[in-house]
Image (cartoon, grey):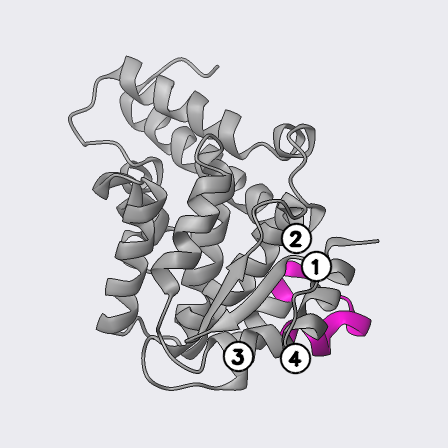
Amino acid sequence: MSVWGKVGGAAAGLVVGGPVGALVGALAGHFFLDRDADPGVTFTIAVVALAGKMAKADGVVTDQEFEVFRRIFSVPAQEEANVRRVFNLARQDMAGFEHYAGQIAGLFRDNPAVLEDVLDTLFEIAKADGVLHPCEARFLERVAEIFGFAPNEYRRIRASHFAPELSDPYVVLGVSYVADDDEIRRTYRRLVRENHPDGLIARGVPAEFLKLATDKLAAINGAYEKIQLERGLKIQ
């Protein structure tokens, strides 16, 4: 069964009160995830719920946010209603978003590339209306902090979604303008290692999350090439 099929079962359990699958129930707007459940299901449920909270951050809830989520993760048509149900329940209020972020961070603390993919998704939901609302920015900054990203790393991730920093290769790589060549090379190699789809597959990341890693890797390579040309570094 695909991870979305399992999410569908969990969503159905939520509707009838659970506990079923990855969920042990619902209370005060929180989905409490069973730590003994399939990690892929736990992760995906938490991502759907956190994305729903992101959609509520600016106070305006539209169908655009779910459409962005559905497109990024290629939710199968037969599972869309169940996934939408979890998404809609989560976006009723902002309560519990730090809980979901903490669940995800706990599962993938040693795999920052996956955490970055989740943050990428939240940015895409935030810009569904073309504007980054201040409340959305605060939400994203807090999630990034829970995920363990330093401020410069957060700026790099933000730059891949919102201009004018989008074209700044130093921001894309998350390095200082005065960083030496060795630091830039080390950072580039780490980012490639963390975001390479082959590595994510080997670590068992659900296939639905690989497209974001592929897109991010292209941006990282492009930024490094710009810096190499600017500094006259040897192409490696």
Q: CA distance from mark 4 to mark 2?
A: 17 Å
Magenta highlight on residue 120:
no
Q: Position of residue 163 (x, y in %)?
A: 31, 59
Between discs 4 and 1, the one toward the N terminus: 4
Between discs 1 and 2, the one toward the N terminus: 1
Disc 1 to disc 2: CB gap under 8 Å = yes
Rendered residue at 35%/74% (across/down): 94
Residue on which disc 4 sits: 15
Give the amino acid type for the residue marked by disc 3 in the picture: Leu
Nearer the observer, 114 or 192: 114
Residue on which disc 1 sits: 21
Q: CA distance from mark 4 to mark 1?
A: 12 Å
Residue 89: numbered disc? 3
Q: Is residue 93 visible?
A: yes
Q: CA distance from mark 3 to mark 1?
A: 17 Å
Q: CA distance from mark 3 to mark 2?
A: 17 Å
Bin the neighbour count of mark 3 within 10 Å (Cα to Cα): few under 14, some 14-19, many 20 and up.
some
Give the amino acid type for the residue marked by disc 1 in the picture: Gly
Give the amino acid type for the residue marked by disc 2 in the picture: Val
